[in-house]
Image (cartoon, grey):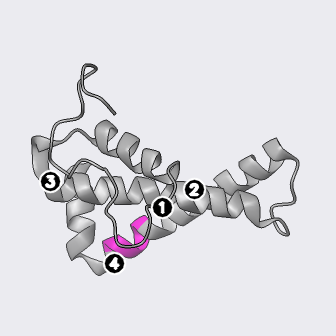
Amino acid sequence: MRELFRLAERDAPLRAVLRRVLLEGEAASVRLVAHRIGADPERDLRPAVAVGAGAAALLAAVRAWVLDGPRTALPDLVEEAFALLATEPPPAGTRPRVRPVGTAPRTPEEPS
């Protein structure tokens, strides 16, 4: 899978096909989320925003995984990306406490 995403970064037609597949998956997910919360997927922005944010987090994790090589496991990056969605933005002028891509995940003994 890593190689597919690496190729898509360099090949515009492949990138377009991959993006179309991802967009179709997002559309299906929007309908599913809308159904689960009893919302109209055409008029209520909540399902589309939630799915869009999740898709962006997932794509950011995949991109980091492709760039980082074998040093970081994709599930760790996905977990980190979704954790970022759940946190409040830091105050202006500060940096969030997020481990850099390629560093080992926290061990259970480490404070959060």
Q: Quadrant of residue 30?
A: bottom right
Q: Mark 2: few, some, or many residues within 10 Å (few <14, many ≥20)?
A: few
Q: Mark 4: few, some, or many residues within 10 Å (few <14, many ≥20)?
A: few
Write the start and end of the magenta stretch as one range.
Answer: 14-18
Labels 1 & 2 near each other (Cβ < 8 A):
no
Q: CA distance from mark 3 to mark 2?
A: 26 Å
Quadrant holding the C terminus:
top left
Labels 3 & 2 near each other (Cβ < 8 A):
no
Query: From the viewer's perspective, is 68 left or right of 108?
Result: left
Q: Earlier in the sequence, mark 2 or mark 4?
A: 4
Residue marked by disc 4: 13
Residue 103, placed above or below residue 39: above
Q: Which mark is residue 68?
A: 3
Secondary structure beneath label 1: loop
Q: Earlier in the sequence, mark 4 or mark 3?
A: 4
Q: Which mark is residue 89?
A: 1
- The amino acid pointed to by label 4 is Pro
The reply to whether the magenta stretch includes residue 40 is no
Numbered disc in front, either 4 or 3 = 3
Q: CA distance from mark 3 to mark 1?
A: 25 Å
Seen at 73% across and 47% down, the residue is: 32
Q: Earlier in the sequence, mark 3 or mark 2?
A: 2
Numbered disc in front, either 3 or 2 = 3
Residue marked by disc 2: 25
